[in-house]
Image: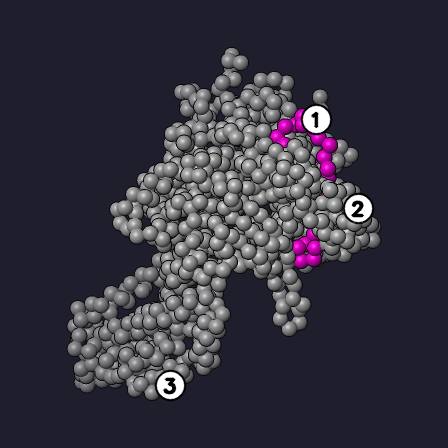
C-alpha cells in the first residue's frame, strides 16, 4: 500500500463575522498520494478553496482552523513552527491560484522572481539559479525561455502567466501542488494546454496535485480520484470513474445530471432545487437534506458519516448507511 | 422565412490611447459580420475572450454604436433611428447580462427593479403596476414576499431570475443573453437554462445566446455561430457544428472542451500558442498561426464565409 | 413550470433582510468607541444650542444684553466659564453662539451639496462639452484660495449671517462637483447603468434613480467631515468681522474679541476656542467612522 503524502483528518475551519460564525469546513478528511491528481469539486461556498488554503496554513483572518490535523510526512502542519512552515510553503508544498496576474509581482521580471524563489530554497549562485529557471520554463512548455525570463508579468498572456506560476512551483522542488481553479480564468483552448501540462507533471515528476475546481469536465479529464464537497463536508469520494459512472450520493447524481451538453438537447435539465446553504446556517443532519429528493427523518437529525461502499469509494449518505447497502 | 434581425457588414473598432505622444491603437472587435436571426430560434454565439461575441450582442441592439454596417430589426434599420425612437423600440429587444450582481442596481429593491421598464414604457402605475410585477416574479419562480428585498439578500440564481423578469416585463420579441449562466453554479445554471427554455416556448421569444462554454451553447441553441478574432468562422445548425464541424478552430474548440465523462478519452487537438490580440490580428486568415491545417494561402488571403451545403457556412481555405 | 419544491427550497435558504444589514451597521457603529464619543459631543452641542435659554440663568446675556458690572469675572459658581468684556456669562454666550455656528456649518454644507451634487452628476454622466463647461467653472472657483474668495464675496454682499453663509457655500460646492463627477464617471461604466439604458430608461431618470442614490454615501461622508471645516470658516469670517454681527453671539467672533484680553482673561478666548475645536474634531472623526461602516468589507470583519 502506498503511503499518502498528505493526510487531512477531520479538518474544521470557522470564520468569525459580525453576522455570526461561518462554518466553512466541518470535518473534512482525505489523503493525497504521490503521483496522483486528486480533485476537489463543489459549488460556490462549499469550502474547496478554504481547504487548499488550510493545507498551506494560509487561512486569512477572521478565519481559523479550529480542529483536525494536516499530516505531511508524519508531521502535523498545524503544530509546525512558523519559520518551518514558511520554508515548506512555496518549497515542498506550492500553490497555483486562479488569477496568476495577482500572484506575480508586477515590478520584477519573471527571471528575477524565479531566481529569488530558487535562491530562497537552495544555496546556488545567481547564474545557476537563472539557468535552472530557464530549464523550468522549458519544462512547462514555454517556447522561448530566455525571452520570457526578461519579460514582465503584464507582457505575458494569462496562459503564459499560469505556466510561469507552475514553473516557479517546480523550481522550488515542490512535491505537492495545490492548484486552486488554475484554468477558470483561461480560455478553453488554453485550459486544454494547462491541464495537459499538469497531467504530464504528475506522470513525469510524480508530483501530487490537489486540483480544486467547480468544473466537472476538468475533473473527469484530469483527476485520478475525486472528492465531492458540499457545505464544508465531503459527500462522496472515490476513483474518478466510480464517481462519474457509479455515483452513489444524491448530490453527486444531481450535479452530474444538471450538466448541459449536446446529447441533452431538446430536453429539460434535471436541476437540483434550491441553492447552496450559507456557512452561517448549515442545515442540521445531512447538510444536503433540504434539497434532497430521498431525505427522511434520519437525514434531518443525524449527520451521516463517510463510509466505504466499494474499494476506495466512500459515501456520506444514510441511504448507504450501516446494514443498508 | 423572413429574418427577424439582420446584420450586414457589422463592424466595430474601438480606439485606444491617442493623445500627443502615443500612436492611436485600434481594437478590431468586430469585423464585417453578416448574420440573420429568425423568429423563435436560439442562435448561439460561442468563442474565446476577445473574439467579439459580447460586442456583437451589444451592437445588434445598439447598446454600443457600430463603426460601420447595418442592423435591420423587422426591416427597420436600427442604426438610422434617432434617440427617442430608438428608446421606444427598446421594448421589443432586451438584454440579460452575465453577472446579475453587477447588472442590478444594489440600491433598488425588487419592486423598483422590475417596475423600472414598465415605468419607462407604459402608463401602468400603482396597484396595476404592482400586480404586473408580482405576476412577472411568479412567472420566473419568485414570490410577492420578495418585492421589498434588496439584491444582496438573494443568491446568484435568484438575482438572474430577477434580471430575466426585468427583461420580459415589456413582452419583447428578441432577447440577447450575454453569458447568463456563467456566474452561476452548475445546479443553478440548470434551473436558469430550464426557465429560459420554458419562457421561449411560452412567449415565442427569439434568443441570441452568447457564451464561452460550448457545452451550454450546444445544449440550448438551434443554430451556432463560432467566432474568432471578430469574425464568424463557422455558422450552422447545432447538429452540423457538433457532428460535422468543418473549420479547424471549431474542431479544436470541440476537442478542448472537457466532457464530464472520464472514459471519453478523445484524441485531443491542443492548439499551440495564445489567441492573438485584436489590436494586431494576423494577416490573411486570423487563425492561421495556430492552425494545424494551414496552407500557404492562409497567411495572405482572408477566407470568405461560404455555404458548404444546407446553410452550413464556413470561412476556411481548406473547405471549398 | 418550475417545480414547487424547488421554489420552496430557495425560500428556505438563509437570508439577511435589509434591516439586518442596518443592524449590522449599527452594531459595527456601537463597537467604534471613537464614533460614539464624536456623536455624543455633537449631540451635546446641538442640545446646548437648542435649549440655550433654559440651560442658563442669563438668557438675556446670551442674546447680547451687556452686564458691565461683572466684566472679566474668572470662572466661578455664578459664572462657570467666567464672563466676557461686556460682563456677559460665557456659558450663555457659548450656548447661544452654538446656534449660529452650528447653523452655519449645516447650512453651508447643505447648500454646497445641493449645488455641487447635481452639477457633478450631470458633468460626469453626459461628458463632452457639458462636462467641459461645468468643470472649467469649478476650476475658476478653486483657483482662488477659498477663504479669500469667501471674504471677497461677503465683503461685496455686506457683512451679515446670511451673506457669510452664502459666501462660504459658494466657495464650497466645487468640491462636491468634483467628488460626484469622479464617482459618476465610474458608475457610468457599471453594468446596471448599461442595463437601464438597454431597457430604454430616459437619461434624466437614470441620473435620478441610479446615479444619485449610489453617490450619496461618499457625499454623506464628505459632508460630515466638511461641517467641521465650515464651522471653522464661519468662525474665521466672524473673527475678521464679516460674519455674524454683534450683539449676536458666535464662537469665531468671541475668539476674535477674546484674544485681545488673552493675558488678563485667558478663559474668554479659551472656552469658545475649545468649543470650535471639539465640534470640528467630532465631525471629522464621525465622517471617518461612517466611511468605514458604510463599506461592507470593513463592516463585516470582526477582528
Query: Label 1 is found on which chain of the structure?
Result: A
Element assignment for label 2: loop
**Tag shown at residue C152:** 3
Query: Label 2 is found on which chain of the structure?
Result: B
> Residue B250: where, in percent of width, then height?
67, 40
Q: Is residue C281 visible?
A: no
Element assignment for label 1: loop
The color scheme shown is one colour
**Tag shown at residue B161:** none
Q: Which residue is mark 2?
A: B295
Q: Is residue B240 visible?
A: yes
Check contact, mark 2 vs mark 1: CB within 8 A. no
Q: Which residue is mark 1?
A: A3
- Residue at the far front in the pictured view: B1
- Residues beneath discs 2 and 1 located on the same chain: no
Frontmost of labels 2 and 1 is 2
Amino acid at each position: 500500500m502506498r503511503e499518502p503524502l498528505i493526510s487531512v483528518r477531520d479538518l474544521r475551519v470557522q470564520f468569525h463575522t459580525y453576522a455570526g460564525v461561518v462554518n466553512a469546513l466541518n470535518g473534512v478528511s482525505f489523503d493525497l498520494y504521490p503521483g496522483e491528481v486528486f480533485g476537489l469539486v463543489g459549488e460556490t461556498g462549499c469550502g474547496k478553496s478554504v481547504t487548499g488554503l488550510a493545507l498551506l496554513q494560509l487561512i486569512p483572518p477572521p478565519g481559523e482552523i479550529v480542529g483536525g490535523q494536516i499530516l505531511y510526512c508524519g508531521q502535523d502542519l498545524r503544530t509546525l513552527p512558523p519559520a518551518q512552515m514558511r520554508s515548506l510553503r512555496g518549497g515542498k508544498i506550492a500553490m497555483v491560484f486562479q488569477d496568476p496576474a495577482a500572484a506575480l509581482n508586477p515590478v520584477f521580471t519573471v527571471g528575477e522572481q524565479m531566481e529569488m524563489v530558487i535562491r530562497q530554497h537552495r544555496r546556488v549562485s545567481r547564474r545557476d539559479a537563472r539557468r535552472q529557471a530557464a530549464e523550468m520554463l522549458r519544462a512547462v512548455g514555454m517556447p522561448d525561455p530566455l525571452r520570457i525570463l526578461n519579460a514582465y508579468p503584464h507582457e505575458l498572456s494569462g496562459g503564459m502567466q499560469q505556466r510561469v506560476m507552475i514553473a516557479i512551483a517546480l523550481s522550488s522542488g515542490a512535491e505537492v501542488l495545490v492548484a486552486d481553479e488554475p484554468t477558470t480564468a483561461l480560455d478553453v483552448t488554453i485550459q486544454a494546454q494547462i491541464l495537459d501540462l499538469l497531467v504530464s507533471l504528475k506522470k513525469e515528476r510524480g508530483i501530487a496535485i490537489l486540483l480544486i475546481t467547480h468544473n466537472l469536465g476538468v475533473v473527469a479529464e484530469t483527476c485520478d480520484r475525486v472528492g465531492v464537497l458540499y457545505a464544508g463536508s465531503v459527500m462522496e469520494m472515490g476513483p474518478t470513474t466510480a464517481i462519474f459512472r457509479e455515483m452513489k450520493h444524491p448530490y453527486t447524481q444531481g450535479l452530474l445530471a444538471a450538466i448541459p451538453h449536446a446529447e441533452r438537447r431538446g430536453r429539460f435539465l434535471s436541476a437540483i432545487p434550491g441553492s447552496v446553504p450559507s456557512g452561517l446556517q448549515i442545515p442540521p443532519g445531512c447538510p444536503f437534506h433540504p434539497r434532497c429528493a430521498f431525505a427522511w427523518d434520519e437525514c434531518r437529525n443525524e449527520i451521516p458519516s463517510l463510509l466505504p461502499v466499494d474499494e476506495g469509494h466512500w459515501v456520506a449518505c444514510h441511504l448507504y448507511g450501516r446494514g443498508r447497502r | 422565412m423572413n429574418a427577424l434581425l439582420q446584420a450586414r457588414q457589422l463592424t466595430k473598432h474601438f480606439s485606444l490611447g491617442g493623445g500627443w505622444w502615443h500612436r492611436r491603437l485600434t481594437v478590431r472587435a468586430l469585423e464585417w459580420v453578416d448574420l440573420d436571426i429568425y423568429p423563435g430560434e436560439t442562435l448561439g454565439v460561442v468563442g474565446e475572450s476577445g473574439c467579439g461575441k459580447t460586442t456583437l450582442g451589444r451592437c445588434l441592439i445598439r447598446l454600443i454604436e457600430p463603426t460601420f454596417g447595418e442592423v435591420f430589426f423587422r426591416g427597420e434599420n436600427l442604426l438610422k433611428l434617432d434617440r427617442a425612437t430608438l428608446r421606444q423600440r427598446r421594448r421589443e429587444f432586451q438584454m440579460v447580462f452575465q453577472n446579475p450582481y453587477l447588472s442590478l442596481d444594489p440600491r433598488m429593491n425588487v419592486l423598483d427593479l422590475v417596475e423600472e421598464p414598465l415605468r419607462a414604457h407604459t402608463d401602468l402605475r400603482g396597484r396595476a403596476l404592482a400586480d404586473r410585477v408580482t405576476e412577472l416574479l411568479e412567472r420566473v419562480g419568485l414570490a410577492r414576499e420578495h418585492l421589498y428585498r434588496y439584491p444582496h439578500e438573494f443568491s446568484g440564481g435568484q438575482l438572474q431570475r430577477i434580471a430575466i423578469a426585468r427583461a420580459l416585463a415589456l413582452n419583447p420579441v428578441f432577447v440577447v443573453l450575454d453569458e447568463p449562466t456563467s456566474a452561476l453554479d452548475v445546479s443553478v445554471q440548470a434551473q436558469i437554462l430550464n426557465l429560459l427554455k420554458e419562457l421561449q416556448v411560452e412567449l415565442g421569444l427569439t434568443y441570441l445566446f452568447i457564451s464561452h462554454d460550448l457545452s451550454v451553447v450546444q445544449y440550448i441553441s438551434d443554430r451556432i455561430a463560432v467566432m474568432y478574432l471578430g469574425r464568424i468562422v463557422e455558422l450552422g445548425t447545432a447538429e452540423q457544428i457538433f457532428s460535422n464541424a468543418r473549420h479547424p478552430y471549431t474542431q479544436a474548440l470541440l476537442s478542448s472542451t472537457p466532457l464530464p465523462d472520464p472514459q471519453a478519452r478523445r484524441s485531443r487537438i491542443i492548439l499551440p500558442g495564445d489567441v492573438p490580440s485584436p489590436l494586431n490580428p494576423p494577416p490573411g486568415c486570423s487563425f492561421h498561426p495556430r492552425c494545424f491545417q494551414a496552407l500557404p494561402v492562409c497567411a495572405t488571403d482572408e477566407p470568405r464565409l461560404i455555404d458548404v451545403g444546407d446553410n452550413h457556412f464556413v470561412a476556411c481555405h481548406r473547405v471549398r | 413550470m418550475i417545480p414547487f419544491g424547488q421554489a420552496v427550497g430557495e425560500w428556505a435558504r438563509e437570508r439577511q433582510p435589509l434591516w439586518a444589514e442596518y443592524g449590522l451597521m449599527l452594531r459595527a457603529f456601537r463597537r467604534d468607541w471613537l464614533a460614539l464619543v464624536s456623536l455624543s459631543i455633537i449631540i451635546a452641542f446641538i442640545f446646548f444650542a437648542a435649549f440655550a435659554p433654559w440651560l442658563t440663568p442669563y438668557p438675556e446675556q446670551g442674546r447680547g444684553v451687556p452686564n458691565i458690572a461683572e466684566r472679566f469675572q474668572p470662572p466661578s459658581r455664578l459664572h462657570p466659564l467666567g464672563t466676557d468684556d461686556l460682563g456677559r456669562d460665557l456659558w450663555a454666550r457659548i450656548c447661544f453662539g452654538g446656534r449660529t455656528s452650528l447653523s452655519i456649518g449645516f447650512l453651508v454644507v447643505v447648500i454646497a451639496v445641493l449645488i455641487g451634487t447635481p452639477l457633478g452628476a450631470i458633468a460626469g454622466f453626459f461628458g463632452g462639452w457639458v462636462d467641459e463647461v461645468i468643470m472649467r467653472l469649478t476650476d475658476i472657483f478653486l483657483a482662488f484660495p477659498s477663504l479669500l474668495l469667501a471674504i471677497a464675496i461677503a465683503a461685496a454682499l455686506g457683512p451679515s449671517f446670511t451673506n457669510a453663509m452664502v459666501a462660504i457655500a459658494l466657495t464650497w460646492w466645487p468640491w462636491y462637483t468634483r467628488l460626484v463627477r469622479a464617482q459618476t464617471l465610474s458608475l457610468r461604466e457599471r453594468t446596471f447603468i448599461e442595463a437601464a439604458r438597454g431597457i430604454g430608461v430616459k437619461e434624466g431618470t437614470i441620473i435620478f434613480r441610479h446615479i444619485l442614490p449610489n453617490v450619496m454615501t461618499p457625499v454623506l461622508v464628505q459632508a460630515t467631515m466638511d461641517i467641521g471645516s465650515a464651522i471653522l470658516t464661519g468662525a474665521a469670517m466672524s473673527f475678521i468681522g464679516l460674519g455674524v454681527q454683534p450683539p449676536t453671539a458666535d464662537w469665531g467672533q468671541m475668539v476674535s474679541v477674546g484674544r485681545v484680553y488673552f493675558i488678563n482673561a485667558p478663559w474668554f478666548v479659551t472656552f469658545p476656542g475649545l468649543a470650535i475645536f471639539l465640534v470640528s474634531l467630532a465631525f471629522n472623526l464621525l465622517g471617518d467612522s461612517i466611511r468605514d461602516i458604510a463599506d461592507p468589507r470593513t463592516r463585516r470583519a470582526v477582528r
